[in-house]
Image (cartoon, rainbow, N blue to C red):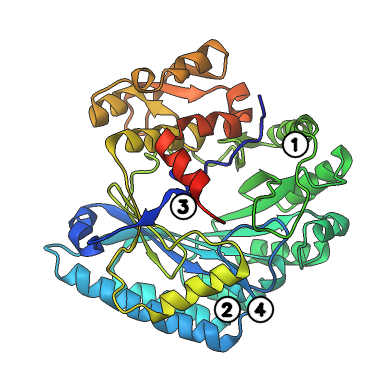
Amino acid sequence: MRRYVQYMYSYPHKTAYRPLEGVSLEDRAGLLADRENEWYIHLPFCESKCGYCNLFSVAGADPALIEAYLDRVEIQASQYREMFERQEKMPVFSSLTVGGGTPLLLSPAQLQRMFSIVKRTAPMTEKPEIIVETAPNQTTEEKLALLRENGVTRVSIGVQSFLDSELLTMGRRHRAAQAEKALELMKQTGFDCVNLDLIYGVPGQTKESFLFSVAKAVSFEPQELFLYPLYVRKGVSMAEGIADEEQAYSLYCEAVSFLKARGYRRDSMRRFVRSDRPMSFRECGYGNTLSLGCGGRSYLGNLHACAPFAVRPSQCRKRIQEFLDTEDYLAVPYGIVLSEDEEKRRYSAKHLLFGPGISLDAYRSRFGTEPEADFPFLRQWKEQGLALEEERTQETGERSLILGLTEEGIGWSDALGPEFISSEVRRKMEEFQI
């Protein structure tokens, strides 16, 4: 069995989305009441496009385009605000994630404008989680101070490697010295959480070179580390990804041992958290998210809405222009409405791959069925030592039987996750032209 099949960071994948008719966010706005909802802002601008990147982003955007984009985001936000005011109760948001692209490519004035737009649109909880992504060569003292002033709690930086030779192989614009300087500035600024991303499976990478990067990362004492395998997908400029899966996995296992010995806990295949930080027991995949901008997903109940998937520069620029030309931002022309079967698949995959596991009581309460009855392959996972049921104490203090992945199972996450993909979603993904 192949170990590196697909990173199931969400379900269904955007390539399974299709045109929708007669669907509006307005019809589902009532779902936002009495919930802690999430904002996502997509800023699709980068200095350059990395060789492995298949995210919705464009390189070399001029300041005028960014200003025009923010103009339309402001109009979109005002339409959301008017929609909220038509509801019986104004929704409250508990988190904001600013993704890209590279959000810190924006000037300080543009970043402040972005934060101001969100603050005017809807109230947030007293202590919201505010997350911003950055790259080493866009991380300045002035911009970090601005983030701190606007309540940012978590900054995620894509370092990928502390060796210039590996950065060049991946088509990264920054150099190791810039990453080290950026991390020093982030540490001095004093965010609640600094997250650092590294990549393994890079052509020419060795055990020694990867552990050098992991050790260098740990020296900055980040609260979180993410270790990503190098996937090379359609539409990207990089030709070669992981050549030998077991060799790449051996690098990963060395890093896992190294991090655990230095006080990091593995919460998922990719995520490592300092052991003094609490584990989250939040339900995965069932919160509401509203997206501002052109490339982020909005989730309202079983409705997933987003612009069509785009990777190639011409496609991304087309989607941005379509966003700039949009008049009604409440209309949902593209997305997917999940059936109960697809909701079960999403719920199970998210809880097993990224959460604390599936609470059998919570699953029964939500769906009226048993996970193993819906997905018989879960029984096989248990027999193979990849999953197990154990009683755990929840945040409420109650004991609950949880179905979760074993340590061995976590290492197979990218092979196990795709088993949740339905035949219908798989067909749509395969038919999609990138």
Q: Secondary structure at mark 1?
A: helix
Residue for badge 4: 60
Which circle's residue, 4 or 3, is located before the other in the chain?
A: 3
- The kind of residue tagged 2 is Leu
Mark 3 — residue?
Answer: 14
SS at badge 3: helix
Kind of residue at disc 1: Ala
Looking at the image, residue 144 sits to the left or right of residue 390; the answer is: right
Q: Residues within 10 Å of mark 4 (few under 14, many from 20)?
A: few
Tag shown at residue 429: none
**Which is nearer the N-term, disc 1 or disc 4?**
4
Q: Nearer the viewer, residue 424 or 184?
A: 424
Q: Amino acid at mark 3?
A: Lys
Query: Alpha-carbon distance for marks 3 and 2?
Result: 26 Å
Residues packed near mark 3 inside 10 Å, few (<14), some (14 to 19) or many (20 plus): many
Look at mark 2 in the image and give the residue it sits on: 106
SS at mark 4? loop
Query: Is residue 337 depicted above or below 107 in this figure?
Result: above
Q: Residue furthest left?
A: 88
Residue 255 image label:
1
